[in-house]
Amino acid sequence: MSDKKVVIITGTSSGIGFCLAKLLVSKGYKVYGLSRRVVNENFESLQCDVTDEEKVKQCFEYVFNKEGKIDVLVNNAGMGISGAVEFIDSAQSKKLFDVNVNAVVSLCKIVIPYMKKNGGGRIVNISSVAGFIPIPFQTFYSMSKSAINSLTMCLKMELAPLNICVCGVMPGDTKTGFTNAREKILLNDGYGNRIEKSVSKMEKDEKNGVSADKVAKVVLKQIERKKPPVLVCVGANYKFIAFLQKILPRKIMLKIVNKIYG
């Protein structure tokens, strides 16, 4: 059995997952990264599409057989779609939910038996501020991250007696390749230029957002804290927004968000 803590991270070919994998290696963790594209770095990169449940099972079995344990799972892989709900077809929304929600559920179900064998572990789900503040023209992404927040809170209660800690990290605007990778549906019949303006504002904020390294440091903190909060925002400004969301009437909060992105 490895004398280092063994971590599996999804979506490690770039962005937050890549930075987190490198950071954890530098802190003495044994890291396995799952991504569709293998990268040549100081962590072991395994080719895996997280929506392929059988392949995921094979990767987890490989890690457990090699290391004798799995201490931490970080569900980081995700995708985005922007556009009006009216124009996003069911195949596109299904793809997003398969990656952002169904795959995360599957990964948790696969890792829990391994952690039970170890006597405990930690699951960290990467969510988003959009999970509790709905963003117009990014509706399916907001829905998926809201689902991840609910999953995180439910699993925290279910798994606590098994010594498996579950928490979520909610970044806001982050400077990564996620911006360019987002699938954009710009059909705007009846919406004027609102969709284009909303997406442009979103992309500008992301390109000027916090670094993936900063988010990685917050994730590391949640991995190492004895009792992490169930959900934590990245950055003081987003923590303030989360506070406002709790105290302001929903009608007022939606007006503010709509003024920015609607």
Image (cartoon, rainbow, N blue to C red):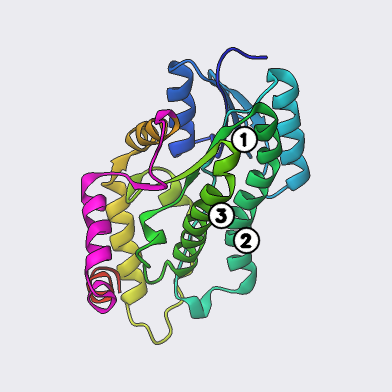
- Does residue 144 appear to the left or right of 219 in the view shown? right
- Does residue 258 appear to the left or right of 156 in the view shown? left
Q: Residue 227's spot in the image, x, y percent?
A: 41, 36
- 104 or 155: nearer the eye? 155
Q: Residue 125's spot in the image, x, y percent?
A: 50, 45
Quadrant assignment for the C terminus: bottom left
Residue 73 makes an appearance in the image: no
Disc 3, disc 1: CB below 8 Å? no
**Residue beneath disc 2:** 95
- How far apart in space, not on screen, are marks 2 and 3 (Cα)? 9 Å
Above or below, comparing residue 90 to residue 62 in the picture: below
Q: Earlier in the sequence, mark 2 or mark 3?
A: 2
The three-letter amino acid code for the residue at tag 3 is: Asn
- Does residue 159 appear to the left or right of 64 in the view shown? left
- How far apart in space, not on screen, are marks 2 and 1 (Cα)? 18 Å
The answer to which image quadrant residue 35 occupies is top right
Q: Secondary structure at mark 3?
A: helix
The mark found on residue 100 in the picture is 3
Disc 2, disc 3: CB below 8 Å? no
Q: Earlier in the sequence, mark 2 or mark 1?
A: 1
Magenta residues span 224-253
The three-letter amino acid code for the residue at tag 1 is: Leu
**Residue beneath disc 1:** 34
Residue 151, magenta (yes or no):
no
Above or below, comparing residue 23 to residue 179 in the picture: above
Residue 234, magenta (yes or no):
yes
